[in-house]
Amino acid sequence: MSKDFDLIIRNAYLSEKDSVYDIGIVGDRIIKIEAKIEGTVKDEIDAKGNLVSPGFVDAHTHMDKSFTSTGERLPKFWSRPYTRDAAIEDGLKYYKNATHEEIKRHVIEHAHMQVLHGTLYTRTHVDVDSVAKTKAVEAVLEAKEELKDLIDIQVVAFAQSGFFVDLESESLIRKSLDMGCDLVGGVDPATRENNVEGSLDLCFKLAKEYDVDIDYHIHDIGTVGVYSINRLAQKTIENGYKGRVTTSHAWCFADAPSEWLDEAIPLYKDSGMKFVTCFSSTPPTMPVIKLLEAGINLGCASDNIRDFWVPFGNGDMVQGALIETQRLELKTNRDLGLIWKMITSEGARVLGIEKNYGIEVGKKADLVVLNSLSPQWAIIDQAKRLCVIKNGRIIVKDEVIVA
């Protein structure tokens, strides 16, 4: 005999409604949210008044590099100090010898770590250059397909070495987009490429040719970084790409005069520019709250995990929210609530999935049950993820993947 519901989550605290509800699910969709749902059901979860959240969004990762520092008593690569050039050089050495199977294994390990922590959506930037070729892209796309019932992965064909530094990058990016990458990305058009106009124009050319969005790394600080982001926003408008471009990192906002940002915010809003800051590297003076209050779309992300760029990381966005609040010295309930939005609804907007995201009737049943009374306490207590639901199915229970 058929049931009215495939799954009901009972007594779920929904922070947006500030009350406790039942959530009724059929297939992969939420079909009812009421104080008390009646009807027959195949499976039930009692949240016991604890917080139920939409699945977390990790809006900027590098899954093809993850766990490359592991396997020895001390983390590989980290006998030397960090510099950008050293990390790029170590990456080139790694990709020269890395196998398809090794990269794919690391991607799957990364994804499983994310899922255990309740992350159900991620965007990963995959190196494409004359050394890596499309080796990493092939492995990531294959893993993406195998992982589709656990996590949604967007893949950026990323010119890590620079379009104008590694001249094979353009043709290899084209090949990667032909293979099925979802976005195109570049890096530091000023200090890496030494060609702001040329690199941005090439990125838009590729994006428009393949009808994909853009996600651009801009680490440059000060006036150089602000200029690069402003030109990216201006070109977004000129190319008819409003709402389709993301700037990742944007460290320059942390040291730019506040009046510069005040002048630029209308441009960013007009262009629909999206931003991502990564909690492992967010500068302490990053004006996160100011950007959010101005209506700028700002997500949060883990960035690299245990590789030649960063020796640490575990893909836990709730831990990331705590790190972000501590780096920025945010303490109020309101501010912690805004940080929570960065790992949920703001991240969903960055990925362009907001139409199907959230706890509302008709939206996808991608949910996390936490051992916590609220988002604020979840961050403070580092709440345990009691259950993770993807496409209406329980995929994690008691910190074990069961799907």
Image (cartoon, rainbow, N blue to C red):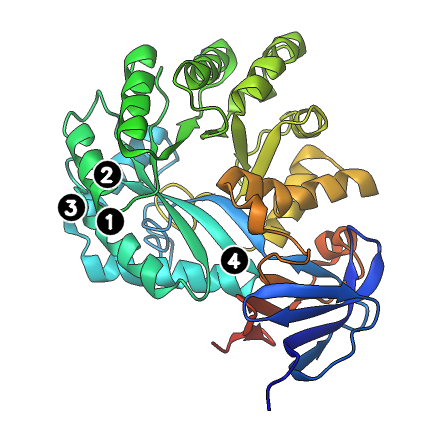
Q: Can you tell which mark lies on residue 136?
A: 1
Q: Is residue 45 above or below residue 79?
A: below
Q: Earlier in the sequence, mark 1 or mark 2?
A: 2
Q: Earlier in the sequence, mark 4 or mark 2?
A: 4
Q: From the viewer's perspective, tell me whether residue 134 is left or right of residue 14.
A: left
Instruction: Select label 4 or label 2 by which is in front.
Output: 4
Q: From the viewer's perspective, tell me whether residue 10 is left or right of residue 4.
A: right
Q: Identify the element where label 3 is drawn.
A: helix
Q: Position of residue 249 (x, y in %)?
A: 49, 30
Amino acid type of the residue that numbered disc 1 sits on in the rendered structure? Ala
Instruction: Select label 1 or label 3 by which is in front.
Output: 1
Q: What is the spatial separation of the Cα atoms under label 4 and label 1, in whole angstroms?
A: 22 Å
- Would you name the residue on which mark 4 appears? 120
Residues packed near mark 4 inside 10 Å, few (<14), some (14 to 19) or many (20 plus): many
Q: Position of residue 59 (x, y in %)?
A: 50, 43
Q: How many marks?
A: 4
- Would you name the residue on which mark 3 appears? 96
Q: What is the spatial separation of the Cα atoms under label 4 and label 2, in whole angstroms?
A: 25 Å
Amino acid type of the residue that numbered disc 2 sits on in the rendered structure? Val
Amino acid type of the residue that numbered disc 3 sits on in the rendered structure? Lys
